[in-house]
Structure formats: structure tokens, C-alpha cells
Amino acid sequence: MRISKELLDELRKGCERPEDLLGDTGLTIEFRIKLMERVLGA
């Protein structure tokens, strides 16, 4: 599976600092949680 540049651009909107992406409440954590919820619910 490939992730498009457009999707990456959409996901990074609002990420102004490294913490917004990698912090304890950042995008990567939220992404992992949502992905696992989807997988477990499938």
C-alpha cells in the first residue's frame, strides 16, 4: 500500500511543531490508536 502525497499533506495540516507530530498526543499516536481500533473492529 502506498500513501499519497495528498494524504500526507492533509494529515500534517495543523502540525506546526515536532511535538504536534511526534509528541505524546501527536498525530503518530492518534494514528496508531485509530488504526488499531479499525483492525480490532474488523
Image (tube, grey):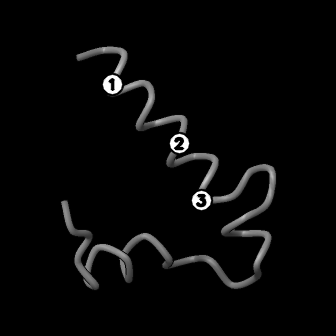
Name the quadrant containing residue 10. Answer: bottom left
Residue where numbered disc 1 is placed? 39
* 36 vs 16, nearest the viewer: 36
Name the quadrant containing residue 26. Answer: bottom right
The amino acid pointed to by label 2 is Arg
Label 1 or label 2, whichever comes before in sequence order: 2
Residue 15 image position (x, y, % from top left): 62, 77
Asked if residue 11 is positioned above or below residue 42 in the image, the reply reads below
Mark in the foreground, 2 or 3:
2
Residue where numbered disc 2 is placed? 32
The amino acid pointed to by label 3 is Leu
Q: Of the numbered discs in the image, which one, if any, rests on residue 27?
A: 3
Q: Are marks 1 and 2 in contact (CB under 8 Å)?
A: no
User: Which secondary structure, mark 3?
Assistant: helix
User: Which secondary structure, mark 1?
Assistant: helix
**Whole-Å distance between the Cαs marked 1 and 2?**
10 Å
User: Which secondary structure, mark 2?
Assistant: helix
